[in-house]
Image (cartoon, rainbow, N blue to C red):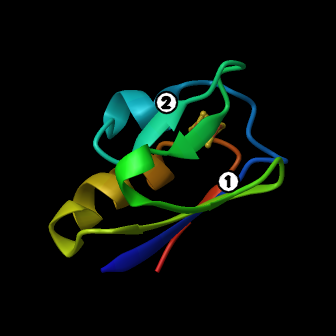
Amino acid sequence: MIQVKIKREICIACGSCYSVCPEVYEGDDEGKAKIVAKYLKEQSDEYSIGEVDTELEKCARDGAESCAVEAIEVS
Ligand code: SF4
């Protein structure tokens, strides 16, 4: 498993990550990114943290790299 952390405080709701990798990311009611329910471990206004299947690592990283404000960390 890999850990994916979205810093929702700095997310500008551009939609890029969840259009690049909808298997891992989705938008909430305001368009801010969160981890999809299947992988979600922790959620608040500040963070959305998930543990994602290793086979989705490239998808998760591509989504993170698409984020203009570098709000997503994959480890
Ligand atoms: S790409 Fe970045 S700024 Fe855009 S919705 Fe995703 S986390 Fe938010």
Compared across the picture, whether 71 is left or right of 36 comes to right
Measuring from the top left, give residue 59's x and y in whole percent.
27, 53
Measuring from the top left, give residue 70's x and y in whole percent.
65, 54
Circles 1 and 2: CB atoms closer than 8 Å: no
Between 17 and 50, the one nearer to me in the picture: 50
At label 2, the amino acid type is Ser
Compared across the picture, whether 70 is left or right of 66 comes to right
- List the residue tagged with mark 2: 16
At label 1, the amino acid type is Ala
| The residue at label 1 has a CB less than 8 Å from ligand 1 | yes
**Residue in view at x 57 percent, y 43 percent:** 34
Q: Residues within 10 Å of mark 2 (few under 14, many from 20)?
A: some
Q: Is residue 67 above or below residue 70?
A: above
**Residue in view at x 22 percent, y 74 percent:** 54
Residue 67 visible to an observer of this rendering: no
**Residue in view at x 36 percent, y 78 percent:** 2
Q: Is residue 46 above or below residue 54?
A: above
**Residue in view at x 66 percent, y 19 percent:** 29
Give the Cα distance between marks 1 and 2. Answer: 11 Å
Residue 49 visible to an observer of this rendering: yes
Q: Earlier in the sequence, mark 1 or mark 2?
A: 2
Where's the N terminus, which quadrant?
bottom left
Compared across the picture, whether 62 is left or right of 40 comes to left
| The residue at label 2 has a CB less than 8 Å from ligand 1 | yes
Q: Quadrant of ligand 1?
A: top right
Measuring from the top left, give residue 33's x and y in whole percent.
60, 38
Q: Residues within 10 Å of mark 1 (few under 14, many from 20)?
A: many
- List the residue tagged with mark 1: 71
Residue sticking out furthest to the left: 55
Question: In terms of secondary structure, where does tag 1 sit?
Answer: loop
Question: In terms of secondary structure, where does tag 2 sit?
Answer: helix
Q: Quadrant of residue 14?
A: top right
